[in-house]
Amino acid sequence: MDIAALLGFVGAVGMILAAMIAGGGVAPFVDNQSILIVFGGSFFAVMYTAPMPTFLASFKAMGKCFKPGLPKLDETVERMVELAGMARKDGMMALEGQPVPDKFFEKGMQMLVDGADEQKLIKQMNSEIASMKGRHAETTGCITSWVDIAPAMGMIGTLIGLVLMLGNMGDPKSIGPAMAVALLTTLYGAFVANVMFMPMAKKLEGFTEFEINYRKFVLEGLRGIARSDSPRNIQDQMAATLPPKLQAKFEIAA
């Protein structure tokens, strides 16, 4: 669980609700027409921006903001060093069936078992990284569409509310509900864009960057195994890219 994402989202929503309650309660800020325009309208407009599989995949990606399941770099180095020792002692076939943290690592290791040289490994693994980056960009772009579309829907709702208000100026009772639609749609649009989806998109972009760097990190270790480098050299090469705190762990172990 990503504590920062959970606390950030709950805290932002909580502060807004607290301000509403302090001003007299949440009820005045609930309007069915505004909800339909902003939430319903944005939902279908965002669907319009992407193929259906990408649109549906974006909801699955949203869950990763709160539970990303990121691999631990130090454990990856340790496992890579163990596998390098096996390959150097017993040959590449010794890597067959060995457990590894993720599918990318497994695919690269299987290529080594199947006799791929370093250049073939680099070409195919970099292709995998580029493909992953493209998929993530499509999904994140779909989420970013909410940031652009929700405020626009809020503006549409504001214009609808103003039209209703100006068209019924002779009926004082209709002015209040029309003004509520005009103002609350703007509020909902700003909430959807800036509290819900903009931080989410930024978070996912950060996770994508981490995963790209992680895969390059794994590829560097696999290249070392393909060259039959010593486990110590592989450890030093991989540890050099780690944060200082994790680097110190391997310096102490050495």
Image: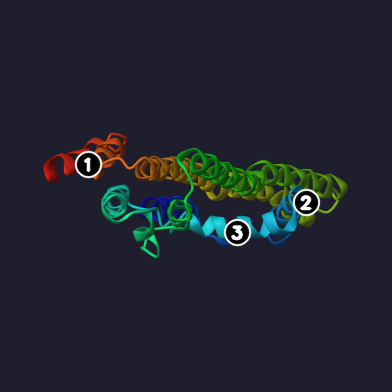
Residue located 73% across and 55% down the image: 177
Q: Which residue is mark 3?
A: 59
Q: How far apart, in angstroms, are the residues tagged by discs 2 and 3?
A: 15 Å
In the rendered image, which quarter is residue 22 located in?
A: bottom left
* Residue 132 image position (x, y, % from top left): 57, 47
Q: How far apart, in angstroms, are the residues tagged by discs 2 and 1?
A: 53 Å
Residue located 29% across and 56% down the image: 90
Q: As rendered, which of 226 and 69 lies closer to the eye? A: 226
In the rendered image, which quarter is residue 245 located in?
A: top left
Q: Is residue 39 above or below residue 155?
A: below
- Tell me the mark number nearer the camera, choosing from 2 and 1: 1
Q: Which residue is mark 1?
A: 232
187 relative position to 115: left or right: right
Q: Quadrant of the C terminus?
A: top left
243 relative position to 182: left or right: left
| Residue kind at label 1, given as amino acid type | Arg
Q: Residues within 10 Å of mark 1 (few under 14, many from 20)?
A: few
* Residue 223 image position (x, y, % from top left): 40, 41
171 relative position to 250: left or right: right
Q: Is residue 39 visible from the viewing direction of this image? A: no
Dot 2 or dot 3, earlier in sequence: 2
Q: Is residue 241 above or below residue 102?
A: above
Q: Label 3 near label 1: C-beta < 8 Å?
A: no
Dot 2 or dot 1, earlier in sequence: 2
| Residue kind at label 3, given as amino acid type | Phe
Q: Point out which mark residue 48 bears.
A: 2
Q: Quadrant of the N terminus?
A: bottom left
Residue located 49% across and 47% down the image: 116
